[in-house]
Each structure stands twice: as C-alpha cells, then as structure tokens.
Amino acid sequence: MTVIVPGQTIGILGDGQLGRMMAIAAAELGYKTHIFGQDKDGPAAQICTTMTVASYDDKKALKKFADSVDAVTLEFENIPLETLRFLEPLVPVRPGQKVLQITQDRNLEKNFINKIGIPTAPFFNVESLDDLKEAIETIGTPSILKTRRFGYDGKGQFKLITATQAELAWSEIGEQDAVLEGFIPFELEISVIVARGINGDIETYIPVENRHKNHILDITLAPADVETSISDQAIEMARTIAEEIELVGLMAVEMFVLTDGTLLVNELAPRPHNSGHWTIEGCSTSQFKQSIRAAAGLPLASAERHSNAVMRNLIGEDASFWQDILSHPEMSLHLYGKAESRPGRKMGHVTRLFPLDTPPNI
Ligand code: AMP
C-alpha cells in the first residue's frame, strides 16, 4: 500500500469548506494539495496549492489531475462512481469505490448496515408510487420518504403524516427512487467520527450530540450526554462499520438514541463531517488532519480529546456577527471565505472549549 510522504501532493475531490479545512490540515503536515472542483474562488480554492476547475466527467482533466497528485481523497460523497473508477487505476483513492457506492445510496447503505448486524430505522425501498403505497402499509405513518441519492440537510425528504399523502410525497421528492423510513421519536441525535488507516488501525472520536435547526446542523456538544454504555456501544458500531466497509479514510456515523437507550444508525458520511469541527480545538489531532493521515497512508494519531466543546454553525447572516464573536476571547471563529451569504448557507462556525470535568454548555 502506497504511503504518501510530506512534500508530495494530495488531490481532493470537492471544493467546499470541508476541502478547505482538509487543505489547511494537509499544509500543516507538509503536503501540497490539488483541489478538483467547480468553484474557482470557493472556500478550498483559496487555500490549495493547485486547483482544477472541471466537471467530474471530464476525463482529460481527470487524467491530468491524476498525473499531478500522489493520492486522492474527497470532501463529499456524491462524486460520480465513474470518476473514481477512472482515477483508481492511476492513483490511490482513499476512501475508494466500495465505500462511495454504498454511502451514495440510502437503500444500499441501510441494507449494508443491517447485514452487518447493526439496526437502522425500519425502511422500505420505493421505486414507484405503487411501491410507496405498499411501503406505507408495511412501515405505517408517520414516516419519512427520502430520495435514495443526493439528499443532504433534509433536502429530498418528505414527512408523511397520513397514508393519503402518498401521491403528494411521491411528487414532492420528484418521483425518484427513494426509501420510506419509519419516523423515529428519538431522544437525541449523536454521531461518531471514525478513522481507519491503510494497516487497519482504527481511531474514534467521542460521540457528540447534534442539534438541528431547519434541517441544518446548528450545534454540536462534545461529548454527548449519554451513559458510558451507550457511548461505548456507539463507538463499537462505528468501528464495526469502518471495518466491514473496509474504510481507508474518515467517516461520520450518525445515530438516533431512543429513550430506552437503543441506538439506530441513520446515515454514513465517508469524509470529515460538520459534527467533527470541534476537534480542531478540542483534540490534539483534528478530524481533518486525521483524514489526511489516513489518505496519505500515515499512521493515525490518537483521537483523544483534551477538552469538551460546543460548536455552533454560522448559517447565512449569522456570520455577519463575526466582530461580536471576536469580542469573546474564549471563542474560536472559523470563516470559510464564501463571498456571498445566502439563507441556509454554511458560512463558518464557532467553537468554545470547556475543561474535561465541565459539561459543554450553550
Ligand atoms: P438525514 O438526511 O437522513 O440525515 O435526515 C436529516 C434529519 O432529519 C436528521 O438529522 C433527523 O433530525 C431527521 N430525521 C431523519 N430521519 C428520521 C427518522 N427516520 N425519524 C425521525 N427523524 C428523522
């Protein structure tokens, strides 16, 4: 397995804030970065050594990119599989096709998770309105219809309260392949970020609690306020998933915690995750640096935290209060360099640390 050494170049597919923070982490480790994406002035373009602006199906640009980098990683999971198939014979791609194939498709993802003995919400594969009607008979309501592919931040989802909404739900999600999921009255949402190196070593960050506003992550509390047995079980599940999917890289495992302590896995994201931004300040090695270590084939670092933390996203106009935030010396401000603020757009985040013996407090 190829190890990429400092001085060499890591290619990153995707050009958003995750790519930006990965490029910063790569630079700290002495690597150059080459971003492949579409936004020449975007968050990652401002940081990287080289940028290619091209579409993911531009074979000529991909070949040139592959020739100029020593390993490839990614900052979002919806890179076309065909792109990875093209790159993989030319350069190590971490994480690779198998991981992307499963995590791009909610039906494959949930089947995979169940097959390895880990529970999810009950779900039913839907490829037509008739399937949806059958799914509603099986799963019942309330339930959530989610497109199998390309969903994020609650997009491509419709919550059904009654069976009479089948036609509406099917049309609202654009009559695409989907899954119907039972609505879970969870107590809280948590996530575990797991990294797996080329030698199979695994490191996991502490489970954190995630609170959403308008379907977008608002706040992460590290650690999640759950019993040790639940925390241990969440970590074990994340480890099992990383092993079984043969991850080389970093992955976030989102879970629901039910009132009786049961854990259900909701979603996998094979890249640094918004719920791991606190690790930049809260851990000696952030999720971003860890993802670069894994992609480069370096040994992983400890994912131990030295502090508790609260991370709050700056969405849309929130970022215009950057001066107020700076007047609080205990707060770490991160802005992503996005020129235009739009409602619902992630513009930056703020992290505040707490001692390990103090619960994170908002
Ligand atoms: P997802 O795109 O699957 O991460 O869903 C976005 C958000 O919708 C989750 O973070 C939950 O807050 C909520 N959600 C998703 N699926 C369910 C479910 N089956 N039951 C209840 N809430 C859900």
Image (cartoon, grey):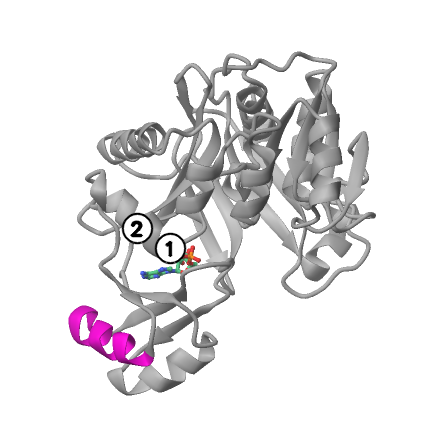
Instruction: Please name the amino acid that badge 1 sits on.
Output: Arg
- Ligand 1 position by quadrant: bottom left
> Of helix, strand and loop, which one carries label 1?
helix
Foreground of the two, 129 or 121:
129
- Identify residue for label 2: 110
Residue 227, horizontal then vertical, whole percent: 26, 35
The region drawn magenta spans 129-140
Residue 295, horizontal then vertical, whole percent: 56, 24
Quarter where residue 72 is shown? top right
Label 2–label 1 contact, CB within 8 A: yes
Q: For marks 2 and 1, give the CA distance.
A: 6 Å
Residue at screen point 30% across, 50% down: 110
- Residue 134 falls inside the magenta stretch: yes
Is 346 left, or right, of 189 in this rendering? right
Residue at screen point 34% across, 48% down: 109
Residue at screen point 29% across, 44% down: 112
Is the CB–ligand 1 distance for label 1 below 8 Å?
Answer: yes
- Identify residue for label 1: 106
